[in-house]
Image (cartoon, rainbow, N blue to C red):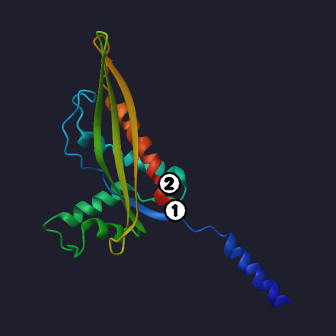
Amino acid sequence: MKRLTLIIAIMVQVVTMQAAPLRVALLDTEDLTGQKPDPVTGSLQTGAIARKGAPLIGKLILKSGLFNMIDRRDFTTRIDNYKRPDSANKPESSPALQAARALRADAILKSAVLSLSAENHSISQGGYNVELKNLTIRLMLEVLDSTDGAIIAMADGTASREFRITDSESTTLGEDGILQLFEVAAAKAIPEIEG
């Protein structure tokens, strides 16, 4: 009877214990759009938005509580050290995988801006001309195994905002507005990789 009680107590503890959060290393966000700026975005380049994406994704990842994020400065410094041509410990695999292993990361989170585009819809009725623009950003997230680089999870998220442009009204979205769209798209993608 005591053995059965002990076994049941151990099983209950094992079932109720939460798994430790994964240690994740976050790579810089890539710009895969290959598009020119739209009048709605003004002179903003998607590369500039992508460079600022990693901290926003890191903030959302930490809020979820399922991941522990490795300090990006340590991670990027290690990657740069492994990339140097004169490095004595030149890795056989990619520098990012080698750096993740050195920092004992369980996974690497890779992100990319897939598109930042504006769709146009024009209405001309009774001498009144209106142009509707719908600005959409699509973001992709990949979780890579730090031991071999295999893709563990993949998700994407989108966010959009509509503008009305008339003869007397025009809108140009600033960098912060696009970063807000980026953050909304990332917030949609992160729950998919958590599962």
Helix, strand or loop for disc 2? helix
Depicted 76 relative to depicted 93: above or below: above
Q: Position of residue 184 (x, y in %)?
A: 44, 41
Q: Residue at x 77, y 81 (%)?
A: 8
Residue, disc 2 = 191
Q: Quadrant of residue 106?
A: bottom left
Q: Residues within 10 Å of mark 2 (few under 14, many from 20)?
A: few
- Nearest the viewer among 182 and 35 is 35
Residue, disc 1 = 195
CB atoms at circles 2 and 1 under 8 Å apart?
Answer: yes
Q: Position of residue 82 (x, y in %)?
A: 22, 66
Depicted 66 relative to depicted 119: above or below: below
Residue at the extreme right of the image, as rendered: 1
Count of numbered circles on the image: 2
- Nearest the viewer among 80 and 174 is 174
Kind of residue indicated by mark 1:
Gly
